[in-house]
Image (spheres, rainbow, N blue to C red):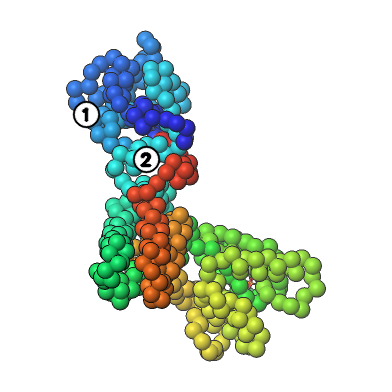
Amino acid sequence: MKNFSNTDIIVALATPTGNGAIAVIRVSGKDCIQLVESCVKEKFSRQVTVCNFYKDEELIDEVVVTTYQKGYTCQECVEISCHNSQFIIQNILTTLIDNGARMADHGEFTRRAFLNGRFDLLQSEAVADLIASDSKDAHDIALQQMKGNFSQSLKSIRQDLIEIASLLELEIDFSQEDVEFIEHTKVIEKIKDIISQIKKMIQSFEIGDVIKNGLPIAIIGKPNVGKSSLLNFFLNEDRAIVSNIAGTTRDLIEGETFLGGIKCRFIDTAGLRKDTNDEIEILGIERTYSALEKAKLVIYVIDVNSNPENFNDDLALIKDKPHILVVNKIDLQDKKFDGDWIYISTKEKKNLNLIENKISQIFKKDDYSVVVSNVRHYNELKTVCKNLEDAQKSLIDAIPNDMVMVDIRLAITHIGYITGEISNENILDSIFKNFCIGK
Ligand SMILES: Nc1nc2c(ncn2[C@@H]2O[C@H](COP(=O)(O)OP(=O)(O)OP(=O)(O)O)[C@@H](O)[C@H]2O)c(=O)[nH]1
Ligand SMILES: [Mg+2]
């Protein structure tokens, strides 16, 4: 961010442009209440005042002004609710700017809230996630992070590491006397415990990311097994052409829907087969492989008449990805296959709910007390884990304390980067530039 002061009066529209009855303009900074008073030509004696807003002597709108001695940014704030007209909004903004305010930068309100101690950095980032949340689970995760449960876990880990570091340091100071202030086996145990907590957080990202950004699901299988029929069922519309001609679907066909609280992006693909000379189908099959690679979940479909010899190769292809195995067309015959298959009929809409249940089961967040959903936090946690594993190894190998200390201090620093206990302008800029102006 440019070299702005943290107390300048900043203004921005806080509501989205578009249709709607009311718009809210946010103002924050030292003496901003006085600034707004000069534009409405009266003194506010209550927190909420209905008044007229003027540009010079010209009436712009009847507005509702709410004042806060310590608002969202932990400083003097005003919210002006006006009628949602571009003309009115522009005139109010320019009047405020002409009288000494300036336009806020991206995320500057939340950045001030962080700098003034309202939230830590992780909580500030959760504000953006809360605003973007589009499902109950995404909302739950963002709200919990904003309320501070993830921050609290990290702070307690950081405190434990600081204690270990100070004891190890003390030993270095008294190294001549050969005193052991702390049993190294206990330190190793403690670090092992912290590593497992951090690993659990890292692991939770797989689910947190899916809940926040959606789940790409590739529907894969041999031609004609009913992949497109399944897509159409989930989307509740005839999105893809269904026919009994093998090789109907060529291109990737996508559609989004919520299942079990997760935003699922289904990708219907061309059937996998080797014996085709059809150029377009071959291109379609290539796209199937790329969809398979990008998907975070694969639904592999066979037809109840299939012979395992024909699809075993495909199973090898998907074995390292989370997958759901589905036998379709059970209305035609009753046949069981080895393995964990779900038996359905898209024609008779039989057992289709079992697929949804399975998706919720695979991407269940309840096993985690903390769910990481932000890629920046995830990357920092991986660094912390690596630092602690290095420290643990050095302790086991009885390497001198000063070497161990380097890794423990690095772990402490990287935890500090997540919560913002350690931050710098570059980190803050890269985080808040993704916020919109007015947030
Ligand atoms: N009996 C029966 N037929 C089904 C069922 N599901 C799909 N079909 C039929 O199977 C044929 C193929 O269905 P699609 O959904 O087009 O299959 P696909 O896997 O997308 O086929 P390609 O795009 O060619 O790879 C169609 O004639 C469907 O009507 C089912 O549960 N039972
Ligand atoms: Mg198809």
Q: Position of residue 285 (x, y in %)?
A: 70, 69
Q: Residue at x 36, y 67 (%)?
A: 401
Say whether mark 1 is within 8 Å of ligand 2. Answer: no
For disc 1, the marked residue is 47
Q: Around disc 2, counting alpha carbons within 10 Å, would you say few (fewer than 14), some (14 to 19), or many (20 or more)?
A: many
Q: Earlier in the sequence, mark 2 or mark 1?
A: 1
Label 2's element?
helix
In this rendering, does residue 26 appear at all?
no
Q: Residue at x 61, y 81 (%)?
A: 316
- Dot 2 and dot 1 residues touching (CB under 8 Å): no
Tell me which amino acid carries mark 2. Answer: Thr
In this rendering, does residue 99 appear at all?
yes
Q: Is residue 409 above or below residue 342?
A: above
Label 1's element?
loop
Q: Residue at x 61, y 69 (%)?
A: 292
Tell me which amino acid carries mark 1. Answer: Gln
Q: Closest to the observer: 142 or 7?
A: 7
Q: Closest to the observer: 62 or 376?
A: 376
Q: Locate residue 251: give its quadrant.
A: bottom right
Q: Position of residue 388 (x, y in %)?
A: 40, 67
Q: Closest to the observer: 95 or 134?
A: 95
Q: Locate residue 222: give its quadrant.
A: bottom right
Quadrant occupied by the C terminus? top left
Marks 2 and 1 sit apart, C-alpha to C-alpha, by: 22 Å
Q: Residue at x 58, y 70 (%)?
A: 219
Q: Position of residue 138 (x, y in %)?
A: 39, 57
Left or right? Give the position of 242 relative to 160: right
For disc 2, the marked residue is 110
